[in-house]
Amino acid sequence: MQTVFLCLFTSFLKTSYIERKCEEAGFEKLVAIDTMQHTSQYNLPDIRHGGGRISSAKLRNTIEQCEDFTGLEEGVNRYDLLLLVKRAGKHCGFSSKMIQLLDYYMAYTRDIDWEQGSRPIVYQSLSRTALDMGVSERQIQRLEQSLFEAGAITWNDSGNHRRYGQRCEESGQILYAFGVDLTPLAYLRAELKAKLEEKQLYDRAWMETKRQISYYRRQIRSMILELEEGALISDKEINLLEADYAPISMQIRAHMDLKSLRSLLESHKELHGNIIGLFEEQVTHNEPKETDKASCTNDTNVTHYKYTTHKKSNKLDHSRDEAQSFQESSSQSSELQRDNLEQVDRSKLSKESREHKPDQDESEETLIHKTGLQHVTLKQLLNVSSSRFKEHLPIAARPMNHGDFIEAAYQLKGHLGISQNSWGYACLTLGRIGAAVCVILTDQANLRIENRVMKPGAYFNAMIARARVGELKLQQSVMGHLKREFSNDDEQKQECSQKV
């Protein structure tokens, strides 16, 4: 009796469980239950096990692109596409891991796969790819999904999502394949090129802004050092300038965006302008004032109590001829005091002898004053020097002096084709610092783009020849070059800002 009751109870439980599951699944009951035997019959639909990819407009679009693929353009291969992806990088949404996986898949394709009538499908198993990349299968799936979102790949899935395929042994063409399809990458080429050009324009603007910041930093440091060494302002003002410069003296890194760099550049310009204002105040404060008591220093008939100019000493001052001429002039002056007629004759002879002297006897100081070299500062020489010239400047833990520029000019003259004789003649004419300035200007003339000087040695000799006749204006040449440099910097900055 107990056995019969247990069987009936078990049958009832099974029937109730099946009915509840069918009702939850929404299945329709077709046949009534036999109460005596507690059996039921249901018409169950065909259930397919295993999932599929979620259909989307993007997935359907990529599949249509693969079906309409007609091969790459003429002159373009698959590695050109990969190179575009690598150069565009994060600007187009490709991380380093994504590029690494795409490069790995690209190696499993052949040129014939990118031609019309074929498709570049990588049918290697997911597990094998994970082992080669040293990551898990799930990580490979995430990277593939990221590449799909970036528009680089799609999938040609089999019924059970297994990846397999076969190539023709003779032609190498894919006969059938299921796996990762790289065809969408070919349609991405135009977009990659456009974004790469945009990235290159951004990079050029970034580098130009960085270069301008470096320029203003050199100017600010040199001017602060000049103010400190020359004691032009008080220590308190020097400390204030250094405190203003400290927050913007940060090292420039590649992770900084262009907006931050431009803000940093404006801060440098503002501080640079403030320091220039200090220099102008010092120049105005130290300008000599005119006095009522003044005498003309150009009058040759007047002996001044204190000479305003002092002639530099050279070897000619100690030569035998000069000493002899001085003695003769002394004797002539004593004779002139005794006889007026003899005084007139001798003065005529002295005048004729002076007129027949060659131009080479003109003093070095006079030639230097005619060129305006005495008004050229070390800071101006540093700004007008090219990068090639600056490489020859000595590095020392001391303030820069004239000797540094002379040494650099002497080392660079051979590269410009300036002979030792020309250098010596220039030093005799304008002094060593004058010859160094001529080398600096010759170097700039050889580097300029428009009207470039192809024979620097001849250009240098022509400058010295002009100096001999008093036609060389070194100060005007230096200031003109600085003015052109600043105007070119402003034009390049405006051009880059308009492009960006």
Image (spheres, helix red, strand yellow):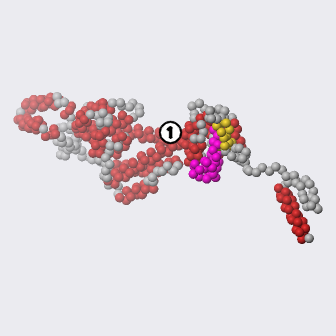
Point out residue 128 in the picture as x, y percentages from the top left corner. 61, 48
Query: Quick check: is 32 in the magenta stretch?
Result: no
Point out residue 54 in the picture as x, y percentages from the top left corner. 72, 48
Magenta residues, as a range?
120-148
Q: Which of these two is toward me, 348 or 399? A: 399
Residue 18, compared with residue 219, is above or below; it is below
Does the rendering let one see residue 178? yes
Q: Residue placed at 23% from the left, 36% from the top?
A: 424
Residue 257, compared with residue 72, is above or below; it is below
Image quadrant occupied by the C terminus: top right
Q: Main secondary structure of the magenta part?
A: helix
Q: Is residue 436 left or right of residue 83?
A: left
Q: Answer with the quarter of the image where residue 246 lies.
A: bottom left
Q: Residue placed at 63% from the left, 51% from the top?
A: 137
Q: Secondary structure at mark 1?
A: helix
Q: Which of these two is toward me, 403 or 192? A: 192
Does the rendering let one see residue 95? no
Looking at the image, the residue that sits furthest to the bottom is 2
Residue 478, compared with residue 241, is above or below; it is above
Q: Which residue is mark 1?
A: 495
Point out residue 77 in the picture as x, y percentages from the top left corner. 57, 35
Point out residue 289 in the picture as x, y percentages from the top left corner. 30, 48
Crowd band around label 1 with a 10 angstrom C-alpha radius: few (<14), some (14–19), many (20+): few
Q: Which of these two is toward me, 187 or 235? A: 187
Query: Quick check: is 122 in the magenta stretch?
Result: yes
Q: Is residue 9 left or right of residue 377?
A: right
Q: Residue placed at 33% from the left, 30% from the top?
A: 455
Q: Answer with the quarter of the image where residue 451 lies.
A: top left
Q: Amino acid at mark 1?
A: Glu
Image quadrant occupied by the N terminus: bottom right
Q: Residue placed at 57% from the left, 51% from the top?
A: 134
